[in-house]
Amino acid sequence: MKLVNLKDEQQVVSFVEAVKIGLGRNQGVFFPPSFERIADIDALLALPFAERSARVLHHLIGDELPQDTLDDMVKRAFNFPAKLVEVADNQYCLELFHGPTLAFKDFGGRFMAECISMFNQGERVTILTATSGDTGAAVAHAFYEKENVDVVILYPHGKISLAQQKLFTTLGKNIHCYAVDGSFDDCQAMVKSAFLDDEVKQKLGLNSANSINISRLVAQVCYYFEALAQLPKSQRDKVHVSVPSGNFGNVCAAMIAAAIGLPIAKLSATTNQNDTVPRYVTSGEWQPNDTLESLSNAMDVSKPNNWPRVEIMLERGDFNKHDFYSRSVSEARTQTVMQELHDKGYLAEPHTAIAYEGLALDSQADETGIFLATAHPAKFKESVEDVLNHKLDMPKPLADALKKTCLAESLSADYNALKTAILAKLN
């Protein structure tokens, strides 16, 4: 798999190199210069989830990883389902929260852990990542107690749900967490600064587990194939997928799936009130505002790292820009849609409600709609119970985590403070 740094086209790397490097020169993300289509999609969709996913990944990655090796990696990583649930006529929810940390990022986090463990061959590595909610838990659990791997997680203090936080801040051992006095964008900027610091990179063997890492991105492609595999063949012709979007990795994965042949006719990248991309799509002006706190906190991102990947795919025609939609959903409307879904018999947290609204805004009557549920409603227990006046039962992983002590340390939104802390702890 040949990958080009989108900010420095002279830096061309393999899949293995890109996974180990994480972020390229000039803070550029790696991406393929083109995609090849899969010939027989129907035959692929007839396969079981894990077997199909390994073939999709082999198609994307190429011969750097033999098919039998990928088969084993995927069986270990994707040992839980992605479920397609019918909510109304021609409207389905793809539930991606049936993994160990009850969020879609379990898919990418666990596959990345398989890759890092294989590629580093005993060399020490430090995974440094920022989280707006679910990445932290997925990455922490995927790498927990893995040999020669330390994980450093930054999160905005007080701006993610308690359930999200406790899933990763209570593990300890090789998982090191910092509650940053700032926004997710502040955390993300600190991570980027670390990757520009040669001293830190050299001493700690730095890598990132954000969706900027190509291993996480390609893993996410697989569950879009699983979604359509669960649809009747008669409903696959005009599929409209709506993705709740913050850092835009998830919708980028959907676009890659379409580029290699999956029949996704329309895509909606639906945001909350942090609406940098919807405004950009309308005006052509890239003008990030200060990040606003919202009910859908995992999408509280004003400067999405994966947007350059999405934009280049639209520019070069990998996906028809006229079939790509991006709208923002207000806080008030989010709550209304949560109630509307509840009235239909479907319990949704805020991110899922936003995806459903994105589907409703741009769907046509002859389309099959799929909206993504990226997290279990119980991860947002307080807001769901408040909006719906409905008492939630806590799944065991969350109930157990909530009983444990938070081990995170406080940190100012300053890169030098981070550098001092992690060099003292890990060097």
Image (cartoon, rainbow, N blue to C red):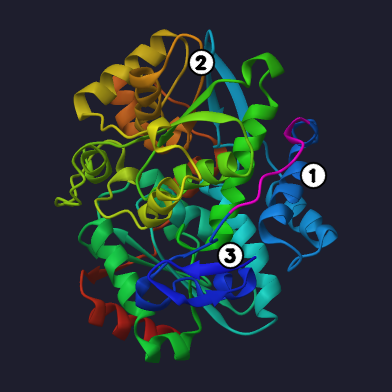
Is residue 110 placed above or below 339 in the rendered structure?
below
Residue at (41%, 57%) from the top-left corner?
405
Task: Tell which circle, 2 or 3, labels the residue nearer the N-terminal end.
Answer: 3
Residue shown at 80% from the left, 33% from the top:
43
Task: Specify the amino acid type for callout 3.
Answer: Tyr
- Write down the residue under mark 3: 144
- Expressed as whole percent of the image width and height from the top left, the position of residue 140 reads 52, 61
Element carrying mark 1? helix
Residue 106: x %, y % from top left: 57, 49
Residue positioned 52% across, 53% down in the render: 138
Q: Secondary structure at mark 2?
A: loop
Mark 2, Cα crowd under 10 Å, few <14 / some 14-19 / many 20+, is: some
Q: Is residue 188 left or right of residue 58?
A: left
Q: Quadrant of residue 338?
A: top left
Q: Nearer the viewer, mark 3 or mark 1?
A: 1
Q: Identify the residue under disc 2.
A: 367
For the point 60% across and 61% down, the residue is 112
Q: Residue furthest right?
A: 68
| Closer to the camera in the image, 170 or 123 | 123
Does the magenta stretch mainly form a helix, a strand or a loop?
Answer: loop
Q: Does residue 390 appear to the left or right of 109 in the view shown?
A: left
Q: CA distance from mark 2 to mark 1?
A: 28 Å
Q: Which mark, residue 6? A: none
Residue 403 visible, this orientation = no
Asked if the residue under mark 1 is in contact with the one under mark 2, i.e. CB atoms within 8 Å, the reply is no
Q: Earlier in the sequence, mark 2 or mark 1?
A: 1
Residues under numbered marks 2 and 3 in contact, where contact means CB atoms less than 8 Å apart: no
> What is the magenta range?
35-42
Quarter of the picture holding the N terminus: bottom right
Residue labelled with disc 1: 51
